[in-house]
Amino acid sequence: MRKVLITGAGTGFGHEVAMRLSEKGFDVIAAVEIYGQVQTLKRQAAERGVMLQVEKLDVTNEGDRRKALAWNVEILINNAGVGEGGSTIDIPAANIRHQFEVNVTGPLLLTQVIAKQMAKRRQGRIVWVSSREGLNVNPFTGIYSASKHAVEAIAESMKDELQEFGVEVATVNPGPFLTGFNDRIFQTWESWEDDPTERLYDYTKLAFPRAQFNPEAVYATMTAVAAGEVDTYRNLEPTSMLEETKRLIDAPWHKKTTDGLGTRPEAIQHAFDMHPEVLRSDQEPLPV
């Protein structure tokens, strides 16, 4: 299997993984959301000395999804996604719908048509880029987390449903990595069409509540999973957060509805105390 389609390749994880898969000899279709990103990515690929077929593919656009039928995709990496930050009580309806259209509905509809082609060939690989937030929850990322919980349910069901047709399914679950994505989540409130006086929180005072990791681990893992060099179904990075993640999955069984009533949770206070774009002190500096 050599023909790869990776969505959301204009920035972040998708951008780097598209480059690395091409360097490994895969035929990479790097899909970007808007036409304005096409020439930029082509130029960046040329500067790096790799070959990419750059295509405009907005996963929420039916016409764009239909184009993918002609590409004979053997490996699909569902990487495109957006993050909507804010309290579940404050986020406007339009933003909630957009979150699920981009992260859930659009990628699923794209996957349906490509997976059927794979099933007919009795071979294929589908990689869902989920999130640690698909396994846990945190304040102010609840709607984003809900979309990734949906991705987890879809991917796990799809794993069973496509097994007899020879199609592999895997997830990659990045934690807090410093690509700019997490910090942008805490800026989406700036374009809300709502009444700011009715919000529970003043979002000018909040930032992503954790220091973040160097993204190299995700680049390496995503590339390896897509290339078939790793065959584990769920792939969480950083692995140092694995035990914490499992502990937090179990935590709701022990909570009570009256826990901490009238007090601010520590996790929310962190968002007030943190500055944007903080790299963990134990990480290698990011390249300039």
Image (cartoon, rainbow, N blue to C red):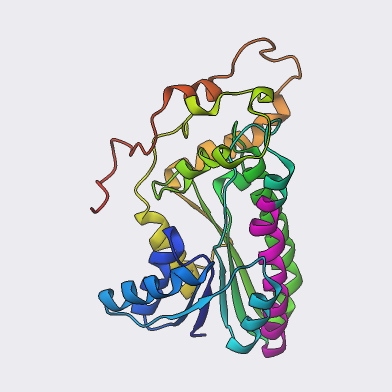
Coordinates of residue 27 in the picture (x, y in percent): 45, 84
Q: Position of residue 145 (x, y in %)?
A: 63, 44
Count up the numbered dots: 0
The residues colored magenta run: 98-121
Query: Where 5 sits versus 141, above or below?
Result: below
Q: Is residue 43 left or right of residue 78?
A: left
Q: Quick check: is 197 in the magenta stretch?
A: no
Relative to 182, is 8 above or below? below
Eyeballing the image, is 64 above or below 267?
below
Q: Residue furthest top?
A: 262
Residue under the point 61% across and 80% down: 124
> Left or right of 268: which side holds 22?
left
The answer to which image quadrant residue 254 occupies is top right
What's the residue at 57%, 73% (across, down)?
A: 57
In-front residue for pair 191/242: 191
Across and down, in percent, residue 99 comes to 66, 51
Residue 105: x %, y % from top left: 72, 61
Residue at position x 66%, y 76% in the image = 65
Q: Main secondary structure of the magenta part?
A: helix
Q: Is residue 108 magenta?
A: yes
